């Protein structure tokens, strides 16, 4: 049995299961939009699983911060001007959801 949820129900589901600290509200709304587009593009229905999403996705304040967790330092070092390169690097390795205030990346 499937249930369609709104973006607000999606965001509230993380609070309801004690996962509200994993993502900011802005990140969750951006992730909802991404997942909804994915469903439409691929013709699949995804199951709402906040715990699973928390295990698969992570929020970061910038693409550079996210990329550094996966070894991007070897490419760019500590150069703070590498944000565009870090974003491209991430996109070549995983799914990236940009939003005002950071990025959400599918962990790899």
Image: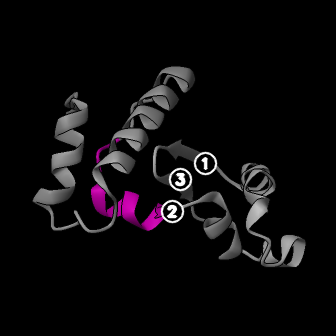
Distance in Å between CA atoms under marks 3 and 1: 7 Å
In this rendering, the label closer to the viewer, 3 or 2: 2
The quarter of the rendered structure image containing the N terminus is top left
Who's the residue at 85% across and 71% down the image?
A: 76
Q: Is residue 62 above or below residue 34?
A: below
Q: Is residue 36 visible?
A: yes
87 relative position to 75: left or right: left
Residue linked to disc 2: 61
**Magenta run includes residue 53:** yes
Residue linked to disc 3: 103
Query: Sequence order check: which comes first, mark 1 or mark 2?
Result: 2
CA neighbours of label 2 inside 10 A, class few (<14), some (14 to 19), many (20+): few
Q: Tell which residue pokes out farthest to the right in this image.
A: 75
Residue linked to disc 1: 96
86 relative position to 69: left or right: right
Secondary structure of the residue carrying tag 1 is strand
Q: Which of these two is toward me, 83 or 36?
A: 83
Is the C-beta separation of discs 3 and 1 under 8 Å? yes
Who's the residue at 44% across and 37% down the image?
A: 35
Is the C-beta separation of discs 3 and 2 under 8 Å? no
Q: Could you tell me residue 27's position as x and y percent? A: 39, 49
The quarter of the rendered structure image containing the C terminus is bottom right
Q: Is residue 108 visible?
A: no
Who's the residue at 15% across and 48% down the image?
A: 12
63 relative position to 73: left or right: left
The part of the chain drawn in magenta is: 47-60
Who's the residue at 17% across and 50% down the image?
A: 13
């Amino acid at each position: 049995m499937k249930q369609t949820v709104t973006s607000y129900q999606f965001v509230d589901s993380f609070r309801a299961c004690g996962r509200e600290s994993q993502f900011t509200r802005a990140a969750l709304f951006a992730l909802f939009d991404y997942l909804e587009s994915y469903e439409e593009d691929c013709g699949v229905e995804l199951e709402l699983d906040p715990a699973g999403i928390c295990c698969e996705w992570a929020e970061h304040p910038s693409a550079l911060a996210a990329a550094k967790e996966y070894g991007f330092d070897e490419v760019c070092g500590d150069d703070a001007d590498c944000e565009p390169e870090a974003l491209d690097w991430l996109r070549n390795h995983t799914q990236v959801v940009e939003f005002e205030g950071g990025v959400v990346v599918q962990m790899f």
